[in-house]
Amino acid sequence: MMLTLLVVAALAGFAAGTGLLSSSSARVIASDNSATVVSTADMAREPVASAVEPASTDSAVVPQTTSGRWGVDRVNAAEAIQVAGTLSTVLVAVIDTGIDGSHAALQGKVIDSIDFTGSGTTADENGHGTHMAGTIAAIAPNVTFLNVKAADERGRCDTDTVATAIRWAADNGAQVINLSLEVAASTDLQNAISYAWRMGAVIVAAAGNSGTTLAAYPAAYTETIAVAGTNQDNGLAVLSNHGDWVDIAAPGQKIQGEFPGGELGYETGTSPAAAHVSGVAALLCSLAEDGSGDGLTNDEVRLALETSAMPLGASGTGSGLVDALAAVQALAV
């Protein structure tokens, strides 16, 4: 089932859209009649140079940071890397709109690409996938990427394609699978998630941008780490889903990252929140040892992520805000 886009202007709620990405004055998510989709357009986008929030409703000021990425700083990525020491390479699959591997921040990191959209190209014609990869790489410099294109230039994707993409990623050695999207639930999708987990992948998915407590998929599946978004005050990001099915939270409001063509820009939504968690997971995959005797380390990585998170006052944010430093230290115990 093909999913169409909705434009969410300011805080005005939801209305049927044309399937096109929004201008800088609107928030974009994707949906069909049965499931709201974080999808590849996410909720907000703007170029760094404009310094204007796309929906023009977010009054929060981005904290000053040395990197320009407040989210990377908030999860203590630099401190975690310093403590971790030498990091081995970790393969991350970004199932999205594609990755622009020519971007300066991503050069040499995309080791394989595949297109499941039928577009005839693995290039990122939307920008969302490149932004997710940029955030992951900013946290975990040890990553390489599988560029798994499952959504088209308008950010549309469907359940069957995503399930196929997940299996391909698992079969091709992905240690972390980032799913900054939401599609309708299905048995095939659930089976694909379970397969990837059994293959040893840490599976991270966005909780969705409907501002609801209703479960979103694939985030709500047991083997998936469901990620809510937070703002600069460690509260719930605008329109982030939340609930007892969410596992963890991460920065998801006005997140700076890469776009195709060498550009930088901001995204708001649970998509970049998931990317932050995938980045931390990639750090941990480099360090984790099999303590359970199952021959895999994805269970150890997930345990470290969730038990070391900082509890938040916002309800429905799982174990709290992901903390790379605390997670690295948890693995060392």
Image (cartoon, rainbow, N blue to C red):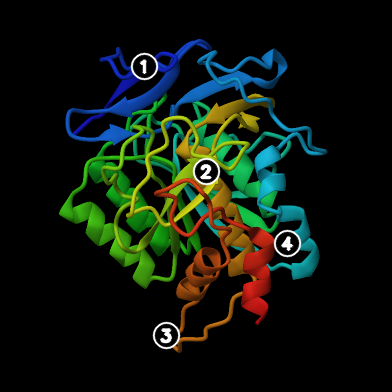
Tag 1 or tag 4, which sits nearer the N-term? 1
Which type of secondary structure does the marked residue at label 3 adopt?
loop
Query: In the rendered structure, which amino acid carries the disc numbered 3?
Result: Asp
Q: Could you give the CA–CA distance between mark 4 and mark 2, rounded to whole angstroms?
A: 18 Å
Q: Could you give the CA–CA distance between mark 3 and mark 2, rounded to whole angstroms?
A: 29 Å
Q: Could you give the CA–CA distance between mark 1 and mark 2, rounded to whole angstroms?
A: 20 Å
Q: Is 110 situated above or below 268? A: below
Residue 108 appears in the rendering: no
Pick the quarter of the image with the C terminus.
Answer: bottom right
Which type of secondary structure does the marked residue at label 1 adopt?
strand
> Which residue in the protein does label 2 denote?
273
Relative to the observer, which residue lies in front, 169 or 16? 16
Residue 128 image point, x, y percent:
50, 31
Query: In the rendered structure, which amino acid carries the disc numbered 1?
Result: Val
> Which residue in the protein does label 3 denote?
294
Pick the quarter of the image with the N terminus.
Answer: top left
Residue 313 image point, x, y percent:
51, 49
Q: Could you give the CA–CA distance between mark 3 and mark 4, rounded to whole angstroms?
A: 26 Å
> Which residue in the protein does label 4 denote?
80
User: Looking at the image, which residue is at 43% across and 56% down?
Assistant: 318
Number of residues whose C-alpha sits closer than 10 Å to that of mark 2, classed few (under 14), some (14–19) or many (20 or more)? many
Query: In the rendered structure, which amino acid carries the disc numbered 4?
Result: Ala
User: Looking at the image, which residue is at 58% across and 43% down?
Assistant: 234
Query: In the rendered structure, which amino acid carries the disc numbered 2?
Result: Ala
Q: Which mark is residue 7?
A: 1
Tag 3 or tag 1, which sits nearer the N-term? 1
